[in-house]
């Protein structure tokens, strides 16, 4: 799942930078005049990452090693050696990260502490014409503040796979923005990914029927007797 979500985040990043969606729409309706659109290069630009877990690390690897971006990340829980291994600059705080981030991508869990982590104040700290990508959870961003930043031109664009609420209402303002690329929470939904999920679920059932404790249990209290006390594999 981590690699699939990371690839989707990078796809949104590149689509925004290269005006892929806007150019496609204009080419279909206006023909070659779409060539007037101008994208931006990502090589040498700074990518800010919030959350350096499995997905964030993979994004850092693709964008740093593959695209030649300077990568800075904020994650107070990630060990220093993770930053060193990935050649990622460690930001001391979110406020330290944001002013550097010409592209900002979010890869943190939704908790009480991260709800609306990116609001009007945080968006104001980003460089002018920055791009924002979110494939984590919709409520990590204050959507009202995001729409305002897109409307005023503070942000050049946003790529979003998650929203608050989901699904988006048909008349939601984000659907009217030409500088926003939207996908319906499909970052991890690929043919390969679905096969992995199906195989994983089947493997869990087989292990249970064989009297073994499955490795990924949400409610271990429901397991019978001896199996409930067995240590879960890591």
Image: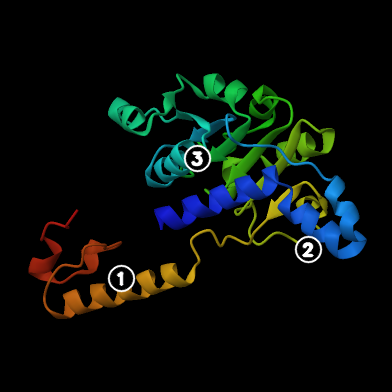
Contact between marks 1 and 3 (CB within 8 A): the answer is no
Q: Is residue 178 above or below residue 98?
A: below
Q: Is residue 172 visible to the viewer in this orientation of the structure?
A: no
Q: Position of residue 26 (x, y in %)?
A: 85, 57
Question: Of 27 and 229, which appears nearest the observer?
Answer: 27
| Residue carrying label 1 | 200
Q: Is residue 21 left or right of residue 5?
A: right
Residue sitting farthest toward the left: 226
Neighbour tally class for label 2: few under 14, some 14-19, many 20 plus, Cα within 10 Å: few
| Residue carrying label 2 | 170
Dot placed on the residue nearer the N-terminal end, 2 or 1: 2
Contact between marks 2 and 1 (CB within 8 A): the answer is no
Neighbour tally class for label 3: few under 14, some 14-19, many 20 plus, Cα within 10 Å: many
Q: Quadrant of the N terminus?
A: bottom left
Number of the front mark, 2 or 3: 3
Kind of element beneath mark 3? helix
| Residue carrying label 3 | 63
Q: Residue at x 79, y 36 (%)?
A: 148
Contact between marks 2 and 3 (CB within 8 A): the answer is no
Q: Position of residue 208 (x, y in %)?
A: 18, 75
Kind of element beneath mark 2? loop
Q: Residue at x 30, y 29 (%)?
A: 79
Q: Residue at x 53, y 19 (%)?
A: 96
Q: Is residue 30 above or below residue 76?
A: below
Question: Of 167 and 7, which appears nearest the observer?
Answer: 7
Give the spatial CA distance, label 1 vs label 3.
29 Å
Give the spatial CA distance, label 2 vs label 3.
34 Å
Q: Is residue 230 left or right of residue 198?
A: left
Q: Is residue 213 left or right of residue 219?
A: left
């Amino acid at each position: 799942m981590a690699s699939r979500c990371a690839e989707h985040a990078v796809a949104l990043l590149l689509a925004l930078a290269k005006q892929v969606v806007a150019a496609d729409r204009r080419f279909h309706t206006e023909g070659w005049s779409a060539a007037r659109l101008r994208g931006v290069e990502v090589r040498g630009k700074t990518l800010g990452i919030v959350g350096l877990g499995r997905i964030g690390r993979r994004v850092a690897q693709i964008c740093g090693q593959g695209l030649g971006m300077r990568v800075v990340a904020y994650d107070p829980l990630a060990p220093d050696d993770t930053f060193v291994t990935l050649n990622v600059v460690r930001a001391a705080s979110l406020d330290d990260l944001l002013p550097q981030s010409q592209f900002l991508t979010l890869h943190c869990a939704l908790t009480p502490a991260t709800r609306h982590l990116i609001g009007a104040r945080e968006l104001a700290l980003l460089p002018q014409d920055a791009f924002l990508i979110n494939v984590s959870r919709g409520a990590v961003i204050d959507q009202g503040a995001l729409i305002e930043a897109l409307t005023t031109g503070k942000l050049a664009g946003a790529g979003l796979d998650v929203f608050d609420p989901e699904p988006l209402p048909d008349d939601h303002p984000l659907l009217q923005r030409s500088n926003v690329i939207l996908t319906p929470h499909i970052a991890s939904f690929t043919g390969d990914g679905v096969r992995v999920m199906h195989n994983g679920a089947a493997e869990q059932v087989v292990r249970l029927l064989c009297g073994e404790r499955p490795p990924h249990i949400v409610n271990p209290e429901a397991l019978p007797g001896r199996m409930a006390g067995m240590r879960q594999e890591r």
